Amino acid sequence: MGIMTSLYRSMLRLPALGLAFAMGLAGLMLPAAALAEAGLSLQPSHWWMDDPNGDLPPLEALSRAGQWHQGKHAAPNRGYVDHPVWFRFDVAQQGEAREAYFEVGSAYLDRVDVYLVQWQGDEPSLLDHQQAGDHADFSERFLNGRYPLFAFAFPQPGRYSLLLRVNTRSALMFPASLQTPRQFYQSELRNQALYGLYFGMLLVLAYFNLMLLIYVREKTFLHNFLFLASIGFYQAGLSGFGNGYLWFGNVEVNDLVMVVSATCSFFFGGRFALRFMELKVRAPTLYYVGHLLISSFLVVLALAFLVSERTLVTVLQGVGLVTALYAFFVMIHQSARGNDWARYLLLGWSTTITGYCMFILAMLDLLEYNGTILFLQAAGLGLGNVMVTTAIAARVRRERREKASAIREALQLSREVAQLNREKEQLQQYASQQLQQEVEEKTRTLNQKLQSLQHSNQQLERDSLSDALTGLGNRRYLDAVFPESIRQCSQHRAPLGILVIDADHFKRVNDTFGHLAGDECLRKISTILQKYCRRNLDTLVRYGGEEFVMLLPATDLEGVLKVAESIRHHVEHAQFWFDNQRVPVTVSLGVHVGIPAPLASAEKLMHKADEALYQAKRNGRNRVEIYKAALESVKA
């Protein structure tokens, strides 16, 4: 109890951590203040040119003016290409000589060659050449930078160009920046402070979920723990920290980590959301569609080791986008229906989904790729999990209150019993007949209360399992007895007959004669059905609306058909009257008979009987249909 209390109190502090993270993010997103160093500026546009053969020298590439294309956005984005691509960034230098740092903002570029070119009129001259990329030794990177970083000296005022030759199997998209050393250090300090807070927050959230998993042993916390671990690896790879501090420049790991961790985050995050929103109970159809979408990520994960990154990312983008939009729809749908847990998720994950959709649009070159999109993803994932942890805290608090209330009631009852025992001992000591009579009277009163309470509980249980209109069992009662009927028939190798009975055109009855007439018809139908459900083994319930279900264990096909036809005939020729008007009522019946398998599902058996019922409806109603591989009609 002490450990759970500490966990609970700590979780209540997590929103403050999320607020601190949001404030840090806001500070990072603000434009850097204008520094004292001025006069060196990177032009807002860039130019690119394909190098299909991969053999162009830098100055010759510059000389082919007609083959250069102006970039659509400030950040280069060529997607996946199978040959080197040249990029040109123009730089204006004013004032004295200075040094500047040029950063290529991607941790997944295999090889990057950067040339510093000075222009004398229209004649370019090559001043410097440097190399970097994730296939290079990480220890040899300038300043051990997270991204490829290059230091260049601009010796005098004039016009310069930074010429990049990029050759990579990964997506060719990156923001580029040119900063003085002071600007770079200030920017990187803010970046590392924010990412330190971000990864620290993920670690704390993962630790809490791990502790909850250990002490509560609920799979929801396992899925959330693995989700947090996956997004941690995803952000570590995307931000460049993973290559430097986790897998230490391992090229194969670096190439796989983004798609594998992104796939795992979709899978485990989706599994967590389904369980957390209690979707299987609240909206089974939405649950099974979501389960199917989430399971598709297992296929994507298997493809990670079989196909190229380009193919894999294309598949992941499509499946991920569909899943993200479906998750957004489900959270809105459930929030509108009063699902508080869905509201927590919607509040936390809406930023995540927005950031992911913007990232996909950027990869398709429909939106400019920049640091804002990366940080929006990180912010959404971080703040989303803070909100989820807050919801977990709310759930734990509710459970603690319920448990505390139960303990108080148990203690109160224990005190009452102890008090009665003390009184009884005192009465025995005095051996007084009068006192003995009082004890007996109190005992009788207590027994009467207990009997009354037991009777009330039994009545409540009966009411919860019965239909108020017809007095038959309800759907909950069917859910309770159906598995036992399956088990008994499977154990004794006996057939189990399932009848689904549905009143024909019942909406027309309600619309024509009124709902009171409809209720009276349902009561009379239930009375007729009870005449054919006489054995103790048989079960009859009102499944919902005008639909009834009858279970006939140990009854072969011939017997079930005989009962079904008798019911249909009886209802057809029965006299249904209401307010001196005869109400025409018929029923359609779907039948399934067979020896159930030991692990047969009640839902699947009901589905087969439902299929037969639908066939009866399609074939004209007021008839009996049997479920077979191809439905065969039994003429009514």
Image: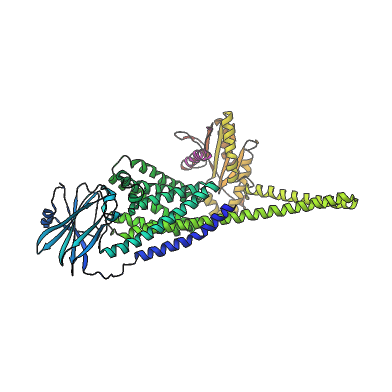
Q: Residue furthest top?
A: 493
Of residue 346 and residue 623, the one placed in the foreground of this image is 346
What colouring style does the render use?
rainbow
Of residue 58 and residue 275, the one placed in the foreground of this image is 58
- What percent of the width, then of the height, locates residue 305? 33, 40
Left or right: 266, with 390 as reference point? left
Looking at the rendering, the stretch of residues picked out in magenta corresponds to 596-615
Give me the residue at 56% from left, 39% from top: 568
- What percent of the width, then of the height, locates residue 32? 31, 67
Of residue 199 and residue 451, the one placed in the foreground of this image is 199
Give me the residue at 63% from left, 49% from top: 464
In this rendering, the answer to whether 570 lies above or below 391 is above
Give me the residue at 80% from left, 52% from top: 422
Say whether residue 541 is visible: yes
Of residue 576 and residue 26, the one placed in the foreground of this image is 26
Left or right: 97, with 426 as reference point? left
**Residue 146 is covered by the magenta coloring:** no
Total labels drawn: 0
Say whether residue 339 is visible: no
- What percent of the width, then of the height, locates residue 357? 35, 56
Left or right: 425, with 455 as reference point? right
**Residue 603 is covered by the magenta coloring:** yes
User: Residue 477, located in which quarter of the rendered image?
Assistant: top right
- What percent of the width, then of the height, locates residue 321? 36, 52
Q: Main secondary structure of the magenta part?
A: helix
Left or right: 433, with 520 as reference point? right
